[in-house]
Image (tube, rainbow, N blue to C red):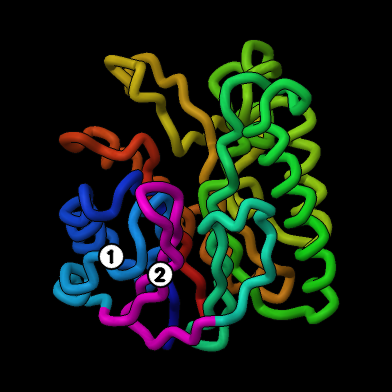
Amino acid sequence: MSGLTIATWNINSVRLRAAQVAAFAQEASPDVICLQEIKCQEDQFPYKAFVEMGYPHAHVTGQKGMHGVATVSRLPIEPLEMQPVCSREEARAQRVRIEGIEIQNYYIPAGGDEPDPETNPRFAHKLDFVERLEAYVRERAKEEADIVAVGDFNIAPHENDVWSHKQLLSVVSHTPVETEGLERVRAAGDFIDVARALHPEEEKIFTWWSYRNRDWRKSNRGRRLDHIWVTPSLRVPALSSGRAAFTVWDHTRDWEKPSDHAPVTLRLKV
């Protein structure tokens, strides 16, 4: 095949929004869709709906009522064993191989409201997850494999990944301890952050807008929480098409009862 399009989307309940995934799939035509926060167990996943969309292959890592990740594909999926990176054993990570490329699908914990691990167990859990992920990525880097890492990382790492760097420095998702931790993960695997490799640092890029904003587009108080990274071996396939290879489908945020995240796609030239 000449290309492989991979999408990542925190769908915030796959059973509630399967029809929106279908609409997105028809428009964007990705070969692979990595979903986060599916909020269901494996046997509750709407497999039939995805077969009807043209995605007969699925690998689901579910949990009752919360969290959960899933990868659906037009092409055969080879599920791969995932090292436990979540100390609570929540359904937040999986990996598969498709067309010789390993795809890692992550849903990093949000971390709650208070950025203090001493008083907020949810934030402590987030930092622990990131630390465990760094160790895992560092070990896997020795293999020099073709890897695409995607998902809702729940961290906006750069100044222009948030609507106001100054105002969000003490807000969970953009605090220095989080952004520095995510950078250590990226560096451990020598990953290329595709969005920033194709777009200048001064350009604002958002993938999430709070439900609290009545007119999300007018206020545009977004954050870039959803990411696609590739290992150095995939630099050329990921970047050679230029900016057109990477898309944030932000108009989906205008749909009725949408997810607060927009899907993101990368077109690999393989």
User: How many neighbours does mark 2 have within 10 angstroms: few (below 14), some (14-19), or many (20 or more)?
Assistant: many
Whether residue 62 is in magenta: the answer is yes
The answer to whether residue 247 is visible is no
Residue in the image at 77% along x and 65% along y: 136
CA–CA distance in space, label 1 to label 2: 8 Å
Which quadrant would residue 238 be assigned to in this image? bottom right
Residue in the image at 71% along x and 76% along y: 233
Identify the mark nearer the N-term, 1 or 2.
1
The answer to whether residue 12 is visible is yes
Residue 93 vs residue 39: left or right? right
Find residue 121 and report its horizontal and vertical position in percent. 67, 31
Discs 1, 2 touching: Cβ within 8 Å: yes
Q: Identify the residue under disc 2.
A: 60
Find residue 242 and report its horizontal and vertical position in percent. 54, 58
User: How many neighbours does mark 1 have within 10 angstroms: few (below 14), some (14-19), or many (20 or more)?
Assistant: many
Check disc 1 and give the amino acid type.
Phe
Whether residue 210 is in magenta: the answer is no
Residue 222 vs residue 110: left or right? left
Which quadrant would residue 188 be assigned to in this image? bottom right
Q: Secondary structure beneath disc 2?
A: strand
Residue 160 vs residue 44: left or right? right
- Return the residue found at the far top: 167
Q: Decide which of 51, 112 is in the foreground and name it.
A: 112
- The circle drawn on residue 45 is 1
Residue in the image at 52% along x and 47% along y: 152
Question: Which range of residues does the magenta coloring cover?
Answer: 56-79
Find residue 103 and report its horizontal and vertical position in percent. 55, 72
Check disc 2 and give the amino acid type.
Val
